[in-house]
Amino acid sequence: MPADVPVDQPARGLDAWDGLFWLWDVFFAIGSIALVVALVQQPGATAADKVATVGALAAMAVWYLCYGRPNIVAAVQSPVRGRIFMGVNLALLVLGVAFEPTMSFALFAVCPMAFMSMCLAEAIAFVVGANLVPVVSALAEAGVDAAVRQLVPGTLFLILFSVLMGTWIVRVVTQSQERAELIQELEDSREEIGRLSREAGVAAERARLAAEIHDTLAQGFTSLVTLVQAAESELDSDTEKARKHLTLAARTARENLTEARSLVAGLMPTALGTGSVDQAIRRQCERFTEETGTPVTYQASGSSVELPTTLEVVLLRMVQESLTNIRKHAKARNVTVSLRVNDESANLTVADDGAGFDPDVPSDGFGLRGMRTRAAQVEGTLSVHSGPDGTKVELEVPR
């Protein structure tokens, strides 16, 4: 998931409607005030009944503000506190209805709080029991006929309405919780993808640097070792030839230093900075002949001037690696390098008449593996044929 996609983040079930929870507070306050007014103006009730009923209602409001509401809006609700809260509410409701039946209108506030504070099954059981309180009170005072005639129809409707409405609200809250969990999982997945992408980028960069170091510095040091050893062996017998090898070693060291600086600066290979890839390959062939004495025949056809830099780098590195392998292992007498460029592809071939090897045998070296990796990076094809008569490495890359 892209990092700039906005995502809603309800952290818990009630967060989906926490912004509108004040509406419930307003409803509770208005309902409580209206019920107090109705209780005070209730005809036929004694002053003591009114005081007791209003006191029960006031206690219910204070109990909600101090104990029930903090648990309802908490990040993690306590089921035990929810049961205690609704148990006290039920006791206050019974107390109020015992003094004045009009107190039963408090059920419009008590029933919703049951679904806010307890699980669905407990809330339904509470709502059924709480709505039966006025019926039981009427049975005790007016008898069965009056209770059935006056309260049972309304009570059944109120129970049904409360259960249906409460169940719907709980399902909405549950869906909000599931949606919050899904969003959190998506965010976690996005973070994991980002972490894996960063790790993949680091690994790719390490592989790139390893290939660059192998194709530049390591090959340069190999040349230096070869030239110094040659100079050391000829120092007593042929001073002029030894001096020539040392001169080539000094030039190689300077070129290696320039390659190292270019690698640090993230620039293109220095051999490509002063001409086309055709000229760079030709210089590599001449340098190989100077250092080893092995003649290299270079052939080029087509125009390589318009090749992309990425392809030029791959072609040059392929020549460098092939010549390094020939120097180290082949003991060849002749080497042929061919570059053919057309409108669709560039084809590079490096062949020698040396000892050869088995390309199918796994090797601990980086050479062939690095060549195949570079070829794959530009969607090219690398083929290696080797035997007793020599080795032929061919690379074809699309333009």
Image (cartoon, helix red, strand yellow):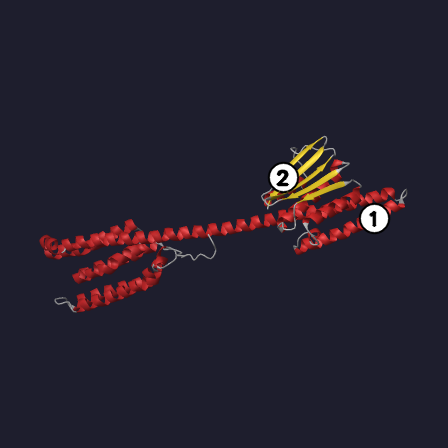
What numbered label is drawn on residue 382?
2
Q: Quadrant of residue 354?
A: top right
Q: Residue furthest right?
A: 237
Eyeballing the image, is 379 above or below 89? above
Location of residue 366 in the rendering, given as x and y in whole percent from the top left corner: 67, 41
Q: Quadrant of residue 49?
A: bottom left
Q: Residue at x 18, y 69 (%)?
A: 40
N-term-proximal mark, 2 vs 1: 1
Q: CA distance from mark 2 to mark 1?
A: 36 Å
- Give the residue displayed 18% in from the left and 67% down from the top: 38
Residue 158 rendering spot, x and y as whole percentages: 19, 55
Amino acid, disc 1: Leu
310 sits to left or right of 257: left
Residue 29 position in % (x across, y down): 27, 66
Observer able to see residue 272: yes
Q: Secondary structure at mark 2?
A: strand
Q: Nearer the viewer, residue 302 or 311?
A: 302
Q: Pointer 1: what residue?
A: 246
Front residue (pair 280, 101): 280
Packing grade of label 2 (10 A; few <14, some 14-19, many >=20) is many
